Amino acid sequence: MQSTSTEQPITLYHRAPSRSAMARWMLEELGVPYSVRNIDVTAPDHPSAELLALNPMGKVPVLTHGDTVISEVAAICCYLADRFPDAGLAPAIDDPRRGPYLKWLFFAPGCIEPAVIHKAMSWPDAPRGMLGWASYADTMRVLVDAAVNATPWLLGEQFTAADVVVGGQVRWGLKFGTVPKHPALEAYAHRLSERPALRRQIEFDLAT
Ligand SMILES: N[C@@H](CCC(=O)N[C@@H](CS)C(=O)NCC(=O)O)C(=O)O
């Protein structure tokens, strides 16, 4: 008989602070047991053969769940929400909100992150048609609009994995000045900061 999601051990290959914080926050939202394997990305042998075997990109986070190995933080959050549906962190497959949910999950790594890095690195402009994120200004306009319409979360009353992934980018961006200090983004970040799961993740990572 196949074991259930909760019976299979979960390990997060982690580094604090980093994007991996979103994966740990997601695990805290689920309230499932997991262990953490801290990866020293400054070690001379980084990325180790062990990490490369799990993620050929040699990056964290990586999550193992039984025999499943998964990297890319948005994919990890999506996977966890689907494997632990009782936590209610994803709309069901046949829920009309599943479309916007997936859009936001992909928008974070596909648009927000490259737009922010492009700007932070002062890379030369390119025609908007060539850039999947169009431009920093367009991406920020859409992000601010999402925060204005978040009531209180991206999909309304239901907090989802998309809030972890987009919210993680917003929190990070406000901290480092890479997203505009718009009142709607600040209010959204403030609501996120009141979530007990996020507080636990921050506390655990500070203790690491
Ligand atoms: N696209 C990856 C990016 C992961 C990533 O860049 N992780 C950084 C930490 S924030 C890392 O592992 N850095 C160490 C390295 O690149 O060697 C994701 O979204 O999970």
Image: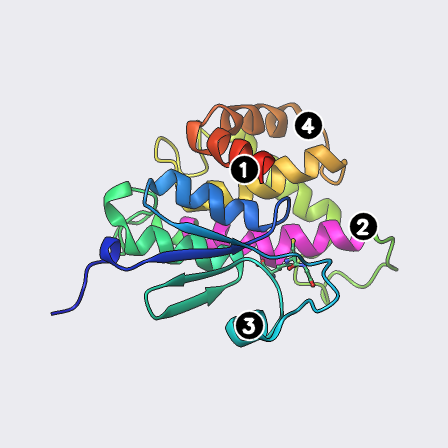
| Residue under label 4 | 182
Magenta part of the chain: 101-118
Name the residue at 34% across, 50% down.
Answer: 81
Q: What residue type is labelled 2?
A: Lys
User: Dots 3 and 4: beta carbons under 8 Å?
Assistant: no
Q: Nearer the viewer, residue 63 or 105?
A: 63
Instruction: Work out whether mark 3 precedes mark 4 in sequence or the reverse, and give the earlier one.
Output: 3
Q: Cα distance, mark 4 to mark 2?
A: 17 Å
| SS under mark 3 | helix
Q: Residues within 10 Å of mark 2 (few under 14, many from 20)?
A: some
Q: Residues within 10 Å of mark 3 (few under 14, many from 20)?
A: few
Q: Nearer the viewer, residue 95 or 41?
A: 41
Q: Residue 146 carries which label?
A: 1
Nearer mark to the viewer, of 3 and 1: 3
| SS under mark 2 | helix
| Residue under label 3 | 50
Q: In this view, does 77 lie above or below 178?
A: below
